[in-house]
Image (cartoon, helix red, strand yellow):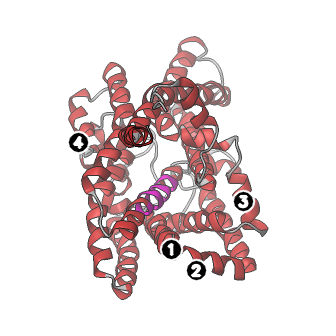
Amino acid sequence: MSVPSPFSLRRNLRLLLKPEAGQLRPIDGLRALSILLVLAIHSVWFLSIFDTTSPEFFYGSPIWLNWVFNGELGVDVFFVISGFLISSILMTEYRDSGDIRFGRFYQRRFMRLMPAYLLAMGLGLLALPNKEYIWSNLLYINNLLPASTHFMPWTWSLAIEEQFYFLFPLLLLWILRKRSALLLAGLALAAFVGSLLIRYLLVQHYQLSLPICWYEKSCEGFFDVIDSIYVKPWARFGSFLPGIFAAYFHVFHRERLREVFRRYREVVGLLTLLSVITVLLVLSVPVNNQHASFSEFWSTLYYTGYRNLFTAAVGVILLATLYGDYGFSGWLARLLSSPVLYPIGQLAYSTYLFHPFVIGGVYTGIFQSAVELPSTQKIAMAAAIGIPMSLLVAALVYLAVERPVMNMRGRQRLVSEVLVEG
């Protein structure tokens, strides 16, 4: 028996297009929708980089397009998924062995994330400002620096995830070794309340209010929002919590969870429906519209709790689609398990890394050759060309870099198995 090459194009293409056995398909669907949300907002938002008058056009957009301008919430879905998957891996290892091998965990994270990231940073050195701050990206602390200095500014979310990967396993091992359900419940409650309290204090300290200034050159306070509450780990860790909670029940109480979902299927279906409605409502709030009016009370309430509300709903959807194979939950699970969404979900990481280069390049071409076009047509062209091209570039990176290195993570184990079988 021979060990398959990690660079086998046929094998890697099959892994991209066809799920492996045991794949949690609804999660791939959620990941796909998340990256599509990010692509949607950046296809629109990048217009403001080239045309300083475009935000006025955005502010006049109809309410049913607010989901596009709230597309940054796609990153919060990534955080929920990351919290679930990483926690599941660590909790499963502890359940099975009584320990967590940190060296192996960090090595696998490095091999999963860094190769494509280094490639993107190399491209960034050719095309982006603030090159002198690339060291902060390499150390995953770029989100702790002032936003005006960020190199590859969209990678703040990768820094938050890596900070989560670094700190959370240590805390998790300590909690699991205590074997105290009361301690676990208390810490979970404290983390949730703490995330709300921190955001509330930040809102009060920095006097943040709605509407949010998302456009650097069209309103005051863009960097204030970014630096104070948008890219800092202490303001965003609440988005990981629903995934962590879901992972705990998924790993340690799977049969009980399955029984509850089966016995109370109508309640689960209703809760799933309410969660979907909650997601849609949060996406519909016109928080970027500088012509909208919000009271101080509603501004504070929204700023403090909207991410927790949104990600809690996503967490319910995640569990319901994994365990609910009937009614509305089952229908949603089948929708998220669509074979169309699966490869998009697999390409989410590379798409996130490289899409700004692609969409920015498309807009550069538009403003060089078709600057007279109205904003709607520019956006339509950027989306129609930039989104498929971003996915294509991501596919090339996945097949040539991401997937081969992922294959290498398990190559030593495969070699050992072959030697034993031989």
The quadrant holding residue 196 is bottom left
Name the main secondary structure of what is drawn in magenta: helix
Q: CA distance from mark 3 to mark 4?
A: 39 Å
Which mark is nearer the camera, 2 or 3?
2
Q: Which mark is residue 256?
A: 2
Secondary structure found at label 3: helix
- Say which amino acid is labelled 2: Arg
Per the image, the residue denoted by label 4 is 139
Q: Residues under labels 4 and 2: Cα distance?
A: 41 Å
What's the mark number on residue 249? 1
Q: Earlier in the sequence, mark 4 or mark 2?
A: 4
Which mark lies nearer to you, 1 or 2?
A: 2
For the residues carrying marks 4 and 2, which lies nearer the camera in this image?
2
Q: Is residue 310 magenta?
A: no
Determine the CA span between mark 2 and mark 3: 22 Å
SS class, disc 2 = helix
Decide whether residue 81 is among the magenta residues. yes
Q: Looking at the rendering, in which quadrant would you find the C terminus?
A: top left
Inspect the image, locate mark 3, and give the three-letter code of the amino acid beneath it: Leu
Asked if residue 147 is positioned above or below residue 351 in the image, the reply reads below
On residue 332, which mark appears?
Answer: 3
On the image, the x and y values in percent for residue 17 come to 63, 36
Q: N-terminal of the two: label 2 or label 3?
A: 2
Whichever of labels 1 and 2 marks the residue nearer the N terminus, that label is: 1
Question: Given the image, on which type of amino acid does mark 4 rest?
Answer: Leu
- Determine whether, in the image, residue 310 is placed left or right of residue 90: right
> Residues at badges 4 and 1 in contact (C-beta under 8 Å)?
no
Where residue 37 appears, as percent x and y from the top left, is 58, 45
